[in-house]
Image: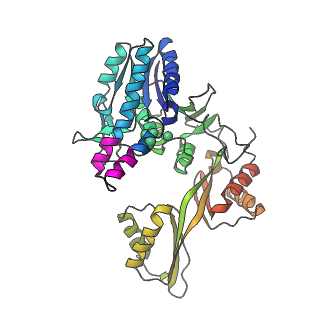
Amino acid sequence: MLIVKKFGGTSVGNRDRIFNVANRCIEDYKNGNDVVVVLSAMGKYTDVLIDMAKEINPNPPKREMDMILTTGEQQSVALMAMAMASMGVPAVSLNAYQVAMHTTSTYSNARVKRIDTERIRAELEQHKIVIVTGFQGVNKFDDYTTLGRGGSDTTAVALAAALHADKCEIYTDVDGVYTADPRKVPDARKLKNVTYDEMLELATLGAGVLHNRSVELAKKYGVRLVVRSSLNTNEGTVVREGSKMEKMIVSGVAADPDAARVAVIGLKDEPGIAFKLFNALAQQGINIDMILQSIGRHGKKDISFTCTDDDADLAKQIIDDLMEFEEIDVDKGVSKVSIVGAGMQTHPGVAAKMFEALFDANINIRMISTSEIRVTVLINEKNTDRAINAIHEKFNLGEE
Ligand code: ASP
Ligand code: MG
């Protein structure tokens, strides 16, 4: 079997953890498998490198930023190969350049385009464990790029797809994917399975376990993922295509406190207003999430939307400079709470049940948005933990 194993920063955070990971990889290797390991930078080392850069230049050139960030992963793969060598196991570390992991040109947020597999195959044929840097690539200018924070997951999935791996295991510091954040919801339960679509929604909603682009890629290439802990041998969660029968109506509830609501009151009620507003925001790279437009009255209408806390002030300023309206209000004290479940496409009443849970807890809903397999509400941030607990309870998510 060919197995791709990815370990996150905490899993390789110190000497003992590095040897722990080495042991787990060697076990698979000794059982006769080909093993490709993808690593993140040790602990919070990527943050350390960012701070280092900002001390020299608060606005560093993006190319140079990627140049420094790629050293984090290079450090961990080299140390891992040394650890394995000290245990008498042949291993080789490779960075994105040596593999040739080709990406788009965009520094700090590149996408994987193509991976050359010859070098990795050649090393595997010589019975080596191959340890590859996560998070990085090389663009058409032969410069290093990075895939965005948390991007090592995407490296692992891309490699698994390119190598037609039999297994892709993502090791992290939690046991798998839960029905809710176990730190916030005491009776949260680990899920045995989630579908790609559910995982994609959960990852995007800030469940934090997987880089969302890794799930997109896994879905596209049918790479079955296992998310599990590097610190114990518990089974973990399988991410795969769902079969119709076993689709959960609701699989989990997620919260994202990093949301702000911008309300623009008394805009002109005429064609092109929404276009003008959102086009200007898009051009400044501001990502918009929920959008609500009121019905027109006396030639006026209101538009509210959400964006990240960080973007809210800039959004307000752009709109201030751009259009005519009566009033604009920014509220950063809001959070998004969502339920996700592949089965809700075919079951009526799911949203109503969620709203009932919030009503029972006396929590006001400020905005609502939905997709086929998700319902999201915007609420006051201080109510977040109460809301996810109330919803978790209402849907009996703690019980199998
Ligand atoms: N080291 C990178 C980060 O901290 C990539 C990763 O860990 O996946 O974002
Ligand atoms: Mg991660």
Q: Is residue 25 visible?
A: yes
Check if residue 64 falls in the magenta segment. Answer: yes
Residue lying farthest to the left in this orientation: 141
Question: Which residue is at 42% across, 68% downward?
Answer: 314
Question: Camera-side residue: 383 or 390?
Answer: 383
Instruction: Please say which color scheme the image uses.
Output: rainbow
Q: Quadrant of the C terminus?
A: top right
Magenta stretch?
Answer: 49-68
Question: Which residue is at 47% across, 34% downward?
Answer: 222
Check if residue 102 falls in the magenta segment. Answer: no
Question: Camera-side residue: 213 or 29?
Answer: 29
Residue 120 screen position, x and y as percent:
34, 23
Say whether residue 187 is left or right of residue 267. Answer: right
Residue 229 screen position, x and y as percent:
58, 31
Query: Is 170 rendered above or below residue 111?
Result: above
Query: Is 51 rendered above or below residue 262?
Result: above
Question: Camera-side residue: 97 or 61?
Answer: 61
Question: Which residue is at 68% across, 53% downward?
Answer: 388
Magenta span: predominant SS is helix
Question: Which residue is at 42% across, 42% downward?
Answer: 46
Residue 268 screen position, x and y as percent:
46, 83
Q: Quadrant of residue 322?
A: bottom left
